[in-house]
Amino acid sequence: MAELSKAYKPQAVEEKWYARWLTEGYFTADPASPKPPFSIVMPPPNITGVLTLGHVLNNTIQDILARRARMQGFEVLWLPGMDHAGIGTQTAVEKFLRRTEKKTRHDLGREEFLRRVLDWQEKHGGIIIEQLKRLGCSCDWSRQRYTLDGDYARAVQKAFVDLYKKGLIYRGRRMINWDPAAQTALSDEEVINKPQKGNLYYVRYEIAEEPGRFLEVATTRPETIMADTAMAFHPNDKRYVDLLGKHAWRPLAREKISIIADEAIDPEFGTGVLKVTPAHDAVDFEIGQRHNLLIVDVLTPDGRINCPTVPELHGLDRFEARKKAVELLQDRHLLSKTQPYENNVGFSDRSDVPIEPRLSEQWFLRYPKTQEALAAVRDHLIRFFPAHWEKVYAKWLESIRDWCISRQVWWGHRIPAWYPKSPAPSSKSQIHVGIEPPANAEDWTQDPDTLDTWFSSWLWAYETMDQETRKKFYPTSVLVTAPDIIFFWVARMIIAGLEFKPGKSERDEDNIPFRDVYFTGLIRDKQGRKMSKSLGNSPDPLELIGKYGADGLRFGLMRIAPSGQDIRFDEKQIEEGRNFATKLWNVARFRQMHGPSEAAPKIDNKKLSIFAVEVLVRLNETIDAIEKTYSEYQFSAVAQELYDFIWSDYCDWFVEAAKTEIFSEDETKKKSALAVMDFVLSAVVRLLHPFMPHVTEELWSRLGFGKDSIQFVPPPGRIALGDVDLVNKRRLVSEIYETVQAGRNLRAEAKIPSNRKIGFILRTHEKWICDELPTISRLLNAEEVRLDRQYEAEVGVPVAVTPLGELFLAIAAVDKTAERDRLDKEIAKIEAELQTVENKLKNKSFVDRAPPAVVEEHRRRLKDFSAQLAKLKQARAGLN
């Protein structure tokens, strides 16, 4: 085997292995395989997207699941792809055109603009796929899909046509959410409510029948007064009942408007009177429908005022018009007061501008299978992790509204509907909906709108697969996604699977898109702020990979990603991930220095040192803990278990203790120690592989643990130690390690460097310690550890009370005050431990219900703590 280099160089190792994995086709799924299936579909990133820490988190988790499943013997499909991102991509290209050519899409026309988008896509699209490869993602790249692939696009059109024929898709004129920046309709889920500080303007409307009498209205939007077509109050509001049926003068674009009563009015808000603007508010629109009010639209699609009768406002941006309208009202003495006011304003999730309620002709979907979708999660056909998202999902489905699926953008899936170019008067509503255009296509014109991007991606879980692949891998095993798209995507995929039934039978359990859904947390900076370019707090993952390696980034991020909680990002954690890889490398290098490793090391339980027994039992405990935490999708807990075991139990304790045998003249002991080193190393690289695939593959290969790739080697199982005396042996090791730690603390408090050899004296009556003295000396880096039952130290010599006896530093007496303070702290610590144990043993419920061995262990601890406390107090008294 080639010798491991002194320093671990992640870039060289990662590039080498990823290229080899691709060449060997290790990630390619075989639908004909007899192995049980495990499948994930990647949430498709935008075609113009670049790698973010959110992508790193999401895809690392998917890769962990995929790699672990391969090791467990599953045939794994991790299907990657990209989304065409209708509004996002079109907006990016339009900005580019304005900057470079000072043109809009309308200047170019639809055909030329789409050609430009394709050019843009060729140059800027798909970058993120190569970046995911840098991360080590084990996707089946041969199956990479795109939401505008020919077959996929046809499936989207077919879904539209099928739903239309079932009466679930319809076209209608309704109040929708309008994005003035992107100039398109949005669904309710694409509107994000944000608290905004503004003003309430109290405007005076004169009663037409009673000149000099005014109605006051509190409004946040005086710029829409020109679209008012009524004044309204609650029918039970006695303040205004005498005005019912009368009229008021509209202050801007002066005109008489009716005064009406409607139960939708809140008498407690403002003055209890509402200015009804049916064209620009959803509630007002419903009031207008009930009272047959005129609808006046005074806003253009890009959010400017369209009202020539008020030239001072005509053509102004809506927010500029608000300021100007206030000035006009003040000049006319129609503004009585202004108050600061904070309310929730709907913002476009796409362009982050305030949306406008707008009456528009759009396509809508009545959601099918909502009750079945509710039941699938409620009855745990589909399980959510963390489980609290089930309530959020259920609440949305229980109050679901029709989905506005048409978008006024050109980039995307064009709606498969055609209208006659010259319709006869009697066939005004004539429409052709189909995958193919009408026979006499030249007499028809296709609907210019495209479908909401999410209408294509709700088919992603199965339309990305051909029939053979779907038969093997659908429903998929797990979906990893962010909770902010639980409505956009997760719920809709569940509905699509239940409606279109792509599974092998009609049963719901064969048609749901996935069995489990794991929701990741949001990554924030150390101050708890969201990552954003504007704040400059969003690091480039590729730079982090360059500094720390992909494995370091993956492991460091996973350690700080608790299930379902937001993540506070700290680059030091990524550095720790790199250091962890280096630690593993160094311990493997140390093992390599002592001869070749055994691929299947033979462990003779009768020849194991107590330190070997301890590390093997801890390995069993770690395997058990990892299995449990994996089953609950607790990835950070898995990472922490691995970190603690490898860094502490294995490297810092066992390997250091084993050096006594490795460097001894006793070949039997040396072989036993090296066999345990190999056994545990072989186990930990397999346990760690899903998190850190590159370094583990390198060590697996270089140490000769197996000829095949580590990716297909089963995870380690528990080792059967078969020793009835495990408890006693572990107690002895625990006492030694605790004594060593106490000695190290003494050294640190006396400011003696850890690399300087120094003497210790152990006052003890334990005879068995003699056999372990060489190891204790090594762990303490001691010049000598002298056993002396009768030792009487000079007052002020540093001492620690340990389970093995009193441990003294073999140095002259130190400052008595400092030693007194140190002993006081030790006494307080032991007293607290003693109190905890005493309280448990006084608790009858604990004593009666706990296993006898646990109760006996607490009684032993009570005895040990009491003895330690007495010795510490004795040492403390000697300093008085």
Image: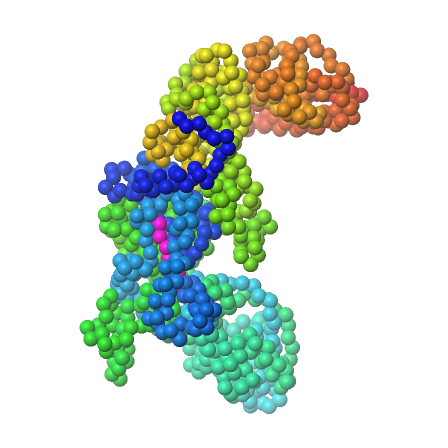
Q: Please, is residue 812 above or below residue 697 in the view? A: above
Q: Left or right: 333 with respect to 407?
A: right
Instruction: Please provide percent x and percent y for residue 701.
Output: 38, 30
From the viewer's perspective, tell me whether residue 505 is left or right of residue 862: left
Q: Residue at x 62, y 81 (%)?
A: 327
Image coords of residue 169 (percent x, y): 31, 67
Image check: 476 left or right of 334?
Answer: left
- The C terminus sits in image quarter: top right
Is 155 contained in the magenta span? Answer: no
- The residue lying toward the viewer, choosing from 272 and 100, is 100
Examine the rendered structure and indicate whether residue 518 appears above or below residue 602.
Answer: below
Magenta part of the chain: 79-86
Inspect this view and state whether residue 136 appears: yes
For the point 26% across and 52% down, which residue is it? 502
Q: Where, by quadrant of the figure, is residue 863 drawn?
A: top right
Which of the image's four quarters has the N terminus?
top left
Tell me residue 237's x, y (percent): 55, 76
